[in-house]
Amino acid sequence: MERVQGPGDGTEPAEGGAAGSRRRSPAVTALVVLAAVGFAVFALLRVLGLERGWPLVPALAFTPHVLAAAPVVAVAAGLLRRWRSMAVLTAVTLVLAAAVVPRTVPFGVTSAGGPVVRIMTLNALGGGADAAEVVSLVRDRRVDVLTLQEVTPDLVRELSAAGLDDLLPHAVDRSDPRGVHGSTIHSALPLTDTGGGEAGRDTFAMPTAVVRLPEDGDGDGEDDVLEVTSVHVPPPLTPSYTDSWQGELERLAEAGDPGTMRVLAGDFNATLDHAAMRALLDAGYLSSAAVRGEGLEPTWPVGRALPGLTIDHVLVDPWMGVAHLEAVEVTGTDHRAVLVEVSLPSPR
């Protein structure tokens, strides 16, 4: 009968020997199973839209990063021969990919045939954004409508001194000395303030204005109009703010006049992986970044050791075209400015 030699004999141990036991360590198995279960629970929350309250809401913002990690952990599980865990992690990868990857594929129209409007939005970080850079962007990109969040009266004065009023003379000013609570809308075209949008204790100013575009020559004697909201939804960083976050997104999703083209531009503190954000899109909007296939372009945080998230958006009416999108860093703020060129439908 052939003798199975041990380690001291210079040969490999038999399957199931000491080395085999180490390969099937219960502790390692438990860790791999816990990882697989954690990824699976995360995927279920994302796909079924079950995240509610803090800390689940902020956690879902990292879905693209979880997707990037899942196949790495799946490969590790395979190398450790934990086949069931590998299968679960592979399924998680496929499920999350189905949710995330489509926003990297362009769809929709680049031109709707009607008037073109260039829109820029920026969170100014408590009034800290460099006013001269903001005005330079407006001038160089020929911006027609600018929405700002976290605007102080001091920043409004700095922007005016830097020449913003010459470029965008019409404004709705809800700036606030508290910094994060203030928002504004600036336009090269005439504006009508629709009222409301005031800041509260756990909510920020979100003014809405009607922008009147030049008559397009369709013969009806009427100008086209575009309703624009400077969006700033509270960050879901505490239970109280998370409740306000949910309520503000639901309010934005409330149906408006079906005959009015609308744009929501600003800091939503939400990604397309949040159920509340997807419900807002279902209410009648498209993500301009997703239309351009740039739905994973991070807008925050700039200059911090944190994973990039796409929380600043320009949401447009489904009938509008999106021809261009750009995200630009601005000194003095940890948000990137988002610039979008949109077009309204041509007259019928």
Image (cartoon, grey):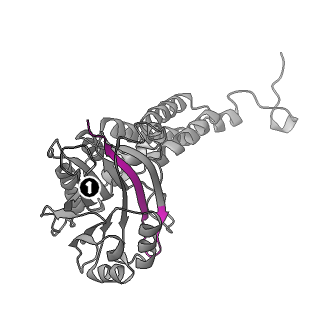
Residue at the limit of the structure toward the top, as seen here: 1
Taking the magenta stretch, the answer to whether it contains residue 346 is yes
Please give the range of residues in magenta.
328-348
Q: Is residue 186 left or right of residue 341?
A: left
Three-letter code for the amino acid on which mark 1 is drawn: Leu
Determine the residue positioned at 37% across, 49% down.
Answer: 342
Q: Which residue is mark 1?
A: 213
The location of residue 270, given as percent across then percent down, is: 33, 53
| Quarter placement of the N terminus | top right
85 in the magenta segment: no
Q: Which residue is at the far right?
A: 10
State the residue lying farthest toward the left. Answer: 195
Residue 127 visible in the picture: yes
Position of residue 313 in the picture relative to residue 29 (left or right): left
Q: Is residue 84 above or below residue 290?
A: above
Of 105 and 7, the residue lying toward us: 105
Identity of the residue drawn at 61% across and 31% down:
81
The residue under the point 84% across, 38% down is 8
Mark 1 residue element: loop
* Residue 250 spot, x, y in % from top left: 19, 49
- Comparing 98 with 82, the one in front is 98
Residue 121's place in the image compared with 222, above or below, is: below
Looking at this view, is 288 or 298 the one in front?
288
